[in-house]
Image: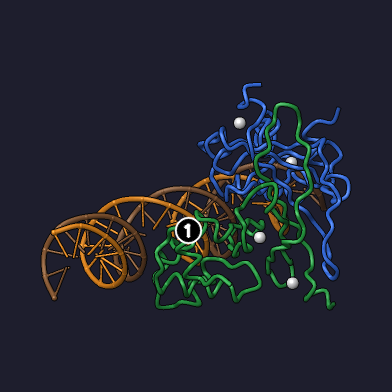
Chain colours: A blue, B green, C orange, D brown
DNA sequence: ATTAGGATGCAACAGAAGTGCATTTATTGT
DNA sequence: ACAATAAATGCACTTCTGTTGCATCCTAAT
């Protein structure tokens, strides 16, 4: 089992207290979080630091950004061994209209999408909206 | 052929000069537009009016909102007879990373997406990013 | 220990989205 | 035609997210 320190070092990122805390916060959450969520969890830390930490994580494929249609960017930890590769790592996301939570459905890869002649597909964002398992009473 | 006036009236919306102009503007564009785009096209009109006009159109299935991942909401006219129905009217959108344009691919309906047990799918947002036909040199 | 580069904190800004209220315009009833 | 009513528009202002510049602090390498 790789420690967080080892993960950060393997990506060439310095290990800092703030980064460890934010990583752990993300790891505990089962849902995608906004910058505000992190901000609320770390009241004494500066917004900018949290923002740049997330950006650093994102650039190094530690977290991926999720655009669930709420207009607010969310983030979630990548899976072990994820390289954010389009072919292998792209999965769908589910946004619940009741609780507002957005979750990664990492087991559900995005199907092949056909685009018209002349168009070149490089990336796909697929978000399903509806009612999540917790809110559907099941 | 239904006139714009007839369309608006059939939806129970009052026909105003502003609404006709905005509708025509949307009809001329082949791409999804932002509120700023409309604002720039109608310099003398107030932002709020444009905003509320688009919202009115949206509530009455005259335009649909598009979240292409740029963080800025875009809008496009619905097809003739569109009721924004999930089964029949949901289509995919393409966002070009070169020209920044987003287009409706109304012929490309969204495939059936499987979600885990307990989840209820009500809506799907599918955006393909890449290079559009005009920018791919084809 | 010194030094250089990265990390953090503070301030400020831009843009999008949204709301409240006053005013204008259109519709309806008399 | 006129008054009453309701909707549409315009103006001001606010909130929230995302972003950048710069100063300071910390850490790691030499
Ligand atoms: Mn995910
Ligand atoms: Mn569309
Ligand atoms: Zn839910
Ligand atoms: Zn293009």
The structure residue drawn at horizontal position 71% and vertical position 72%, both measured from the top left corner, is B99
Image coordinates of residue B97 in percent, x first then y, are 74, 66
The structure residue drawn at horizontal position 59% and vertical position 62%, both measured from the top left corner, is B74
**Which residue is more in the foreground, A7 or B42?**
B42
Image coordinates of residue D8 in percent, x first then y, are 36, 65
**Left or right, B84 with reference to B129:** left
* Residue identifier under label 1: B11
Image coordinates of residue A60 in percent, x first then y, are 78, 49
Chain bearing tag 1 is B
For mark 1, does the 10 Å Cα neighbourhood hold few (<14), some (14 to 19), or many (20 or more) residues?
A: few
Whether B101 is drawn above or below A51: the answer is: below
The structure residue drawn at horizontal position 49% and vertical position 62%, both measured from the top left corner, is B54
Q: Is residue B94 in view from this perspective?
A: no
Whether A26 is drawn above or below B67: the answer is: above
**Total number of numbered discs in the rendering:** 1
Q: Quadrant of the N terminus of chain B?
A: bottom right
């Amino acid at each position: 089992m790789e420690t967080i320190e080892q993960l950060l070092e393997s990506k060439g990122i310095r290990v800092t207290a703030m980064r460890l805390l934010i990583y752990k916060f993300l790891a505990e959450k089962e849902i995608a979080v906004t910058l505000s969520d992190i901000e609320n969890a770390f009241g004494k830390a500066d917004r900018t630091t949290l923002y740049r930490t997330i950006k650093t994580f994102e650039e190094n494929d530690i977290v991926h950004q999720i655009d669930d249609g709420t207009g607010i960017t969310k983030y979630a930890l990548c899976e072990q061994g994820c390289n954010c590769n389009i072919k292998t790592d792209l999965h769908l996301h589910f946004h619940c209209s009741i609780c507002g939570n957005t979750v990664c459905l990492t087991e559900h890869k995005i199907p092949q999408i056909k685009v018209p002649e002349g168009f070149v597909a490089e990336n796909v964002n697929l978000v399903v909206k509806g009612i999540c398992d917790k809110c559907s009473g099941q």
